[in-house]
Structure formats: structure tokens, C-alpha cells
């Protein structure tokens, strides 16, 4: 089992704050702790934290008042790395992380065969975490027309970040279908539930700016640890 590359630390911090704000764990108008205190609590350099706070501010979720502090501002939709990641801890939030189980180039499955322009796809199987909590098992198929070869070393915790920065592929829309299913026979022993166990299930088609289907995925998640949430509203 291989660890995917982590996102830059300031992006991890920014995404964590964005998800905490979206989940309501950081209330609108609340003042964040002083930056040095906050950096110490998170175990990061003050400069890294300030870079993360600047990113959150640029997305309209933070008012940074000179001499007073940093104040949370809620918005219904934000362009973030995990804008389409819909699983959260039961108490809300949780920074998504991943461990790759395998990456293989194979003929696309029937569910994805009619989508995308290539007969093959890159099949990525991963364990998915929210913070340190293991919550899901994923199988992702990326159309091979986007890249001939994909290896573990190419991937980051966020595949959409990898797509945007390495493939010039921007996912702008997704279609999710939510239900239940049994964990597949390839469920690894590292997962805390066995193959055949009934769990929450998501199938997704992700589309590019040209509205082409670029990715198909299946996610099996433990509803005792995580929940699916989609927030919508006017800006």
C-alpha cells in the first residue's frame, strides 16, 4: 500500500478551514485564535498559517482586520480543492486524505465504457480518510485519453488537484447517485469492515469544462463514521 503525495501544507490548512466553516464547526463571525497561538496548536510555522489564511480570505470566507484578528464569514459555495468532496465526519468537517492500493491501466468497465473517448482507463483504488479516521474505499476510473500512464507517485490526496495541475483537466460538474451496496471482494484487510458488508455507496460521473465525462468512480463508505452532505445555496 502506498501513500499518495500530500498537498502543500498551506493548502491542507486552507481546505481544513474551508470544510470546518462549511460544516458550521466555525460559526459565522467567530474570531479565530491569534495566529501564533493557532500555528502552535496546528504544529505549523506562522508563515505557513498566514499563507493558508490568505487563501481562505481570497475565497471570501475570512475577514482579516488589522489589529483585531481574523473573523469567519460564511458563503454557500466556494471554489476549493475539495468543493466536490461530499463525505464528512458525523460531527462535520474532516480533511480528506488517501492511501493508494493500486493503479492499473485496463479496459474500461461497462459502467464507464460509453463515457470518455478511449477504450482504456486508469483504475485507481484507494482508502479514504477524513483526518485520521478511515471512512471509505474508492475505485476511480480516469479515461486514458487524458494521459498514457499514471503511477502512484503522480497522485496527490486530491485527484482533482492532480487533474487540474498535471493534466489541465478541470472538473466542473459531477453527477452522484447515492444508495447502498456491499463492499467488493477486493476490500483490503486494512479496511475496518469486511468484503460483503452492506455500506453506503456513491457512483459518480465527473465532467470537464467541455462537459465530457472524464472520470467514473464508486465509493463505499461507512455510515457509522461519515455522512454524505451536499450544500447548495445562492452566493
Image: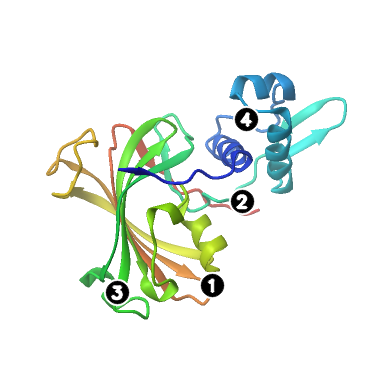
Q: Nearer the viewer, mark 4 or mark 2?
A: 2
Q: Nearer the viewer, mark 3 or mark 2?
A: 3
Labelled pair 3, 2 in contact (Cβ < 8 Å): no
Q: Residue at x 35, y 36 (%)?
A: 226
| Residue 130 rendering spot, x and y as whole percentages | 42, 36
**Side (left or right) of 200 relative to 100:** left
Visible in this render: residue 171? Answer: no
Quarter of the image for residue 43 reads top right
Density class for disc 4 (Cα within 10 Å; few <14, some 14-19, many ≥20) is: some
In this view, the residue farthest toward the right is: 67
Q: Which residue is mark 2?
A: 78
Element marked by disc 2: loop
Q: Is residue 48 above or below residue 42?
A: below
Q: Which residue is mark 4?
A: 27
Alpha-carbon span between mark 4 and mark 1: 33 Å
Q: Which mark is residue 196?
A: none
Amino acid at each position: 500500500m502506498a501513500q499518495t503525495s500530500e498537498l502543500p501544507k498551506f493548502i491542507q490548512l486552507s481546505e481544513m478551514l474551508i470544510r470546518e466553516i462549511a460544516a458550521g464547526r466555525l460559526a459565522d463571525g467567530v474570531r479565530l485564535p491569534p495566529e501564533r497561538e493557532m500555528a502552535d496548536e496546528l504544529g505549523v510555522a506562522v508563515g505557513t498559517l498566514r499563507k493558508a489564511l490568505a487563501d481562505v480570505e481570497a475565497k471570501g470566507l475570512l475577514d482579516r482586520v488589522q489589529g483585531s484578528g481574523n473573523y469567519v464569514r460564511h458563503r454557500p459555495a466556494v471554489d476549493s480543492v475539495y468543493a466536490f468532496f461530499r463525505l464528512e465526519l458525523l460531527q462535520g468537517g474532516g480533511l480528506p486524505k488517501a492511501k493508494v492500493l493500486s493503479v492499473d491501466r485496463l479496459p474500461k468497465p461497462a459502467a464507464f465504457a460509453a463515457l470518455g473517448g478511449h477504450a482504456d482507463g486508469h483504475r485507481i483504488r484507494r482508502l479514504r480518510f477524513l483526518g485520521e479516521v478511515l471512512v471509505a474505499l474508492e475505485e476511480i476510473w480516469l479515461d486514458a485519453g487524458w494521459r498514457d500512464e499514471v503511477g502512484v507517485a503522480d497522485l496527490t490526496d486530491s485527484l482533482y488537484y492532480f487533474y487540474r495541475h498535471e493534466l489541465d483537466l478541470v472538473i466542473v460538474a459531477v453527477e452522484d447517485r447515492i444508495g447502498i451496496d456491499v463492499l467488493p471482494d477486493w476490500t483490503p484487510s486494512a479496511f475496518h469492515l469486511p468484503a460483503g458488508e452492506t455500506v453506503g455507496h456513491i457512483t459518480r460521473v465527473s465532467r470537464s469544462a467541455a462537459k465530457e465525462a472524464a472520470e467514473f468512480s464508486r465509493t463505499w463508505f461507512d455510515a457509522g463514521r461519515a455522512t454524505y452532505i451536499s450544500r447548495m445555496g445562492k452566493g
